[in-house]
Amino acid sequence: MQHLTRRSFLANSAAAGAIAGLAGWEGSRAQAAEPLVKSLPNTEQLGWRVGFSAYTFRALTLFETLDKIAATGLHFTELFAWQKLSPPHADAQPGPKLSKTLRGDLKKKASDCGVQLIGCYTGLDNPDAAKAFFEFAADMGFEFIVSEPPEGMFDAIEKLADEYKIDLALHNHPQPSHYWNPDVGLAALKGRSERMGFCCDTGHWCRSGLEPVEVLRKVGPRVKTFHLKDLDAFGVRGAQDVIWGQGEGRIAEILAEVKRQKIQRPYFGIEWERTADSEPSLHAQSVAFLEKTAEELAW
């Protein structure tokens, strides 16, 4: 990954009213005194939710990530199962092996930060591992599990999803990964439980040369969650992240299609891959673009 040098993004923000208190932020601080995003009335009016994929802050521990999310002013996160838990417990990870005590510590930390642990990315490669993770997800209150399991696991996962009332969100990486083409996922999900659907990684669609709106029209009824990304180029596997609305990732068009389809309570996760850590002020501008677009769509 290329290093993104520190720069100011505020000058071109189309909805600076959604951002406050930027001047006091320093990148080395774990948490700002005041959250940058104060409110999202238009986003909330549409029933939309926005947060972070914890992978955005993968150089940090999960506890440090929660501080960054709180500093931004967002209230949701999707975990990934191999992140270090906290500085004192760097050998622990958010998964089935996490002790009861550390699970309690994680729940308290998230609550103190005002962040809901909405889901987690993990592997579901065999029945025992899948069952163990669904049990963990239920204990933690997740809505969904994001994964790319082999198709031979779908029968077992379908039973677990229905039993635990937790959705499977099938993730796509770029071509040539197995699920890069939505037709593969659609065929695998045909006739299965409504709890099985897609985690729509829009950046990977763009990297694979797939128009996001066209894909959304295919998978719409099965949408579970989003890894929403804007990129500096379309159809280029190595394209890099940019702030929402500033690139070739069709963000405004995606949001308009979500509104048109009336997708219920969609969750848009910021997943920034360009660097392994970044400042909340950077991502607050993506949220500002979301709020501005929601304002245009809400009426």
Image (cartoon, rainbow, N blue to C red):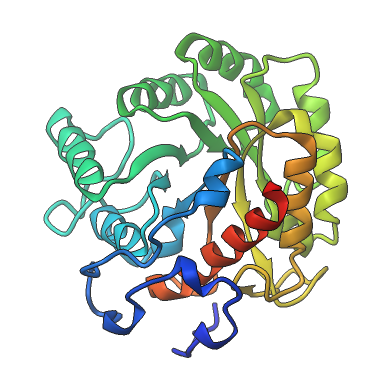
Residue reaching furthest front?
299
Residue 128: give x, y in percent of width and height. Answer: 44, 20
Does the rendering let one see residue 34? yes
Residue at x 60% of width, y 51% of height: 227
Query: Where is residue 235 shown, x and y percent of the image?
Result: 83, 68
The one of 54 and 155 positioned closer to us in this rendering? 54
Left or right, 107 with respect to 208, comes to: left
Left or right of residue 57, residue 173 in this image: right
Q: Which residue is drawn at 39% across and 44% down?
A: 81
Would you place residue 103 above or below residue 188 in this image? below
Residue at 60% over, 59% down: 290
Q: Position of residue 57 (x, y in %)?
A: 39, 63
Q: Dividing the picture into quarters, in which one does residue 168 lie?
A: top right
Q: How many circles with numbers are drawn on the protein?
A: 0
Residue 45 location, quadrant: top right
Q: 227 left or right of 296?
A: left
- Seen in the picture, residue 70 relative to 245 is either above or below; the reply is above
Residue 148, position as x, y percentages in the image:
62, 38
Q: Which one is in front, 1 or 24?
A: 24
Q: Taking 69 as reference, is 44 left or right?
A: right
Considering depth in this image, is 38 or 204 the residue closer to the camera?
38
Q: Quadrant of the N terminus?
A: bottom right
- Residue at the image position 73 percent from the left and 43 percent from the top: 258
User: Can residue 272 be seen from the camera position used here?
Assistant: no
